[in-house]
Image (spheres, helix red, strand yellow):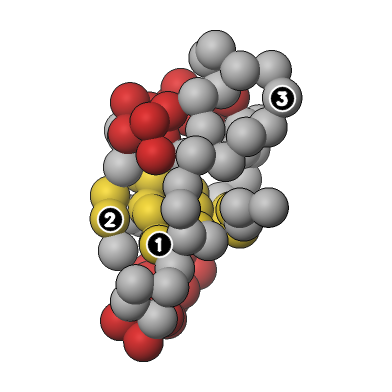
């Protein structure tokens, strides 16, 4: 699992500031977990995502976005409640 901020997101997932049409930039499928440290369900999901990350290493990426530290990302994606996850695939 990798913690990412808005800058990382723009270079690894999707540059929402410049692009209008969705274009996933990654080479592997990715799960983006928007979470907060104080969120109980977020803490429950974290070990599951960690297991997925280890089991499917090299086949999927798992990114975590701390909504408290990255309000720009939360706003850009309309995150109004957490736990919130996205799955990105390359077509």
Q: In which quarter of the image is residue 69?
A: top left
Residue drawn 42% across and 28% down? Answer: 10
Say if 1 sits above or below 64 in the image.
Answer: below
Say if 6 sits above or below 30 in the image.
Answer: above
What kind of element bears circle 1? strand
Q: Position of residue 60 (x, y in %)?
A: 44, 68
Which of these two is toward me, 40 or 59?
59
For residue 53, side relative to residue 84 (left or right)? left
Mark 2 and mark 1 lie on one chain; the one further toward the N terminus is: 2
In the rendered image, the residue lying farthest to the right is 21
Mark 2 and mark 3 lie on one chain; the one further toward the N terminus is: 2
What kind of element bears circle 2? strand
Residue drawn 61% across and 53% down? Answer: 90
For discs 3 and 1, the disc positioned in front in the rendered view = 3
Question: Marks 2 and 1: CB-CB under 8 Å?
Answer: yes
Q: Is residue 68 visible?
A: no
For discs 2 and 3, the disc positioned in front in the rendered view = 3
Q: Residue 2 carries which label?
A: 2
Residue drawn 33% across and 76% down? Answer: 57
Q: Residues within 10 Å of mark 2 (few under 14, many from 20)?
A: few
Q: Position of residue 68 (x, y in %)?
A: 37, 36
Q: Can residue 4 be seen in this view?
A: yes
Q: Name the residue under label 3.
A: 21
Q: Residue 62 carries which label?
A: 1
Separation of residues labelled 2 and 3 (CA atoms): 25 Å
Say if 91 sits above or below 68 in the image.
Answer: below
What kind of element bears circle 3? loop
């Amino acid at each position: 699992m990798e913690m990412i901020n808005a800058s990382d997101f723009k270079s690894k997932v999707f540059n929402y500031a410049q692009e209008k049409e969705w274009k996933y930039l990654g080479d592997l499928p990715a799960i983006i977990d928007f979470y907060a440290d104080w969120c109980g369900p977020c803490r429950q999901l974290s070990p599951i995502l960690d297991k997925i990350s280890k089991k499917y290493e090299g086949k999927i990426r798992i990114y975590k976005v701390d909504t408290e530290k990255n309000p720009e990302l939360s706003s850009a994606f309309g995150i109004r409640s957490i736990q919130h996850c996205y799955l990105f695939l390359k077509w």
